[in-house]
Amino acid sequence: MKSYKITVNGQSYDVTVEEQGVSSPGVTSPAPASAAPAAAVTPGEDTPCTPGGAGVSLRSPMPGTLLSFKVAKGQAVKAGQVLLILEAMKMENEIVAPTSGTIAALCVAEGASVNTGDTLVEIA
């Protein structure tokens, strides 16, 4: 076993981690589970998106799966308009435009898994 001290948002935690596959005498450890490699995110045709370029980069507020886009490239949008549906923790979340503009790029393919902070849409 290994012990670590981890700090999250200024709060310290003492964590003990047990190594898998290491067995003590008389104790059998289960075989490690085989894991398939994570599926790569297949970006939309407009990638690579360039965060920080002209316009606004809409980033994922949470990890999840992009279920569907409600807009298309070149479409004019208004602030507060629903741009896409992001499934997270079995809930469908409407992600809205932070500003008015035109959709410059759809940066992730429908059905792809995204992480917090991934660029989803570029608005010019």
Image: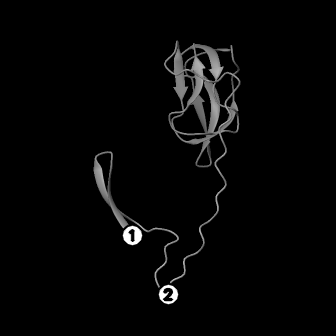
Q: x and y percent of residue 60 in the render?
A: 54, 33
Task: For label 1, count other residues whose C-alpha is less than 10 Å away and answer few (under 14), some (14-19) or many (20+).
Answer: few
Residue that badge 2 annotates: 26
Residue at horizontal 52 percent and vertical 12 percent from the top? 54
Q: x and y percent of residue 82 in the render?
A: 62, 26
Q: x and y percent of residue 117 in the render?
A: 50, 34
* Mark count: 2
Q: If the image is split into quadrants, where does the N terminus sit? A: bottom left
Q: x and y percent of residue 10 in the render?
A: 28, 46
- 13 left or right of 27? left
Residue that badge 1 annotates: 1
Mark 1 and mark 2 lie on one chain; the one further toward the N terminus is 1
Secondary structure state at the residue bearing disc 2: loop
> In the image, is residue 83 above or below residue 13?
above
Residue at horizontal 54 percent and vertical 39 percent from the top? 115
Q: If the image is split into quadrants, where does the C terminus sit? A: top right
The amino acid on which the numbered mark 1 sits, given as a three-letter code, is Met
- 8 left or right of 78? left
Secondary structure state at the residue bearing disc 1: loop
Closer to the camera in the image, 7 or 71: 7
Asked if the residue at tag 2 contacts the one at tag 1, i.e. Cβ–Cβ closer than 8 Å, the answer is: no
